[in-house]
Image (spheres, coloured by chain):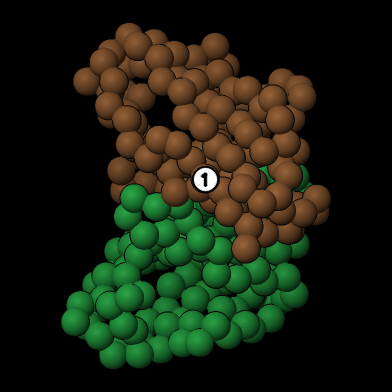
Chain colours: A green, B brown
Amino acid sequence: TQLLEQSPQFLSIQEGENLTVYCNSSSVFSSLQWYRQEPGEGPVLLVTVVTGGEVKKLKRLTFQFGDARKDSSLHITAAQPGDTGLYLCAVSQGGSEKLVFGKGTKLTVNP
Amino acid sequence: GAVVSQHPSRVICKSGTSVKIECRSLDFQATTMFWYRQFPKQSLMLMATSNEGSKATYEQGVEKDKFLINHASLTLSTLTVTSAHPEDSSFYICSARTGLHHNSPLHFGNGTRLTVT
């Protein structure tokens, strides 16, 4: 059973469009992280959300942590080709140091 | 900023040989490093936690005798894939935290693409 379910698995949109991707679980987490990974490279941390209901903005990216701290969303406004990549959510399992990743959403933004 | 460096970035080896991958923390000390494996179009799967000065902790299903991990210093961990087979072909990525708390940022290397022929 996958701890984190990400949807959609694939998303292909045109430049300028808005999009939202989701990370869901039946478990409660103390924090959740979003990463972006480009082909052939390691993931890069975008944000960490900690408080239920928290909203964080990073330029055109808006991250929200669910009130119950079981899910999160990432909204991108006016997507650009540079936003193309694999978006991964991750959590520390059982309060440990280990990070568990979702399967990711592969986003393609076409010019 | 903190940087984690992996070497080599790509390696091709013949079946039955061993390959060593290095993971270095360049401007910070890391008592713990993590090794992940990523198959094509899949997410990162944690293989093991590398602990400086002690034995690594392996995840369920990962063979410790096949994937040898050595963390001899605070800035270097190595993963050796022994007697590699084609099914070991994958993208191997290491990571390390800059702080002690499990919420401190986790920095990833750029990965090593292993192809076993």
Residue, x 61% and y 48% (percent of image)?
A: B26
* Residue B4 percent across, percent down from the top left: 56, 48
In the image, B110: left or right of A78? right
Residue farthest to the left?
A111
In the image, A103: left or right of A54? left
Say above or below: B95 vs B53: below
Quadrant (top left, top right, bottom left, bottom right) of the N terminus of chain B: bottom right
Label 1 amino acid? Ser
Query: In the depicted view, which residue is nearer to us: B106 or A20?
Result: B106
**Residue B91 shows up from this direction:** no
**Residue A108 shows up from this direction:** yes
* Residue A90 percent across, percent down from the top left: 57, 57
The residue identified by callout 1 is: B5
Residue, x 28% and y 77% (percent of image)?
A: A81
Residue farthest to the right?
B100
Name the secondary structure under disc 1.
strand
Residue B105, picture quadrant? bottom right
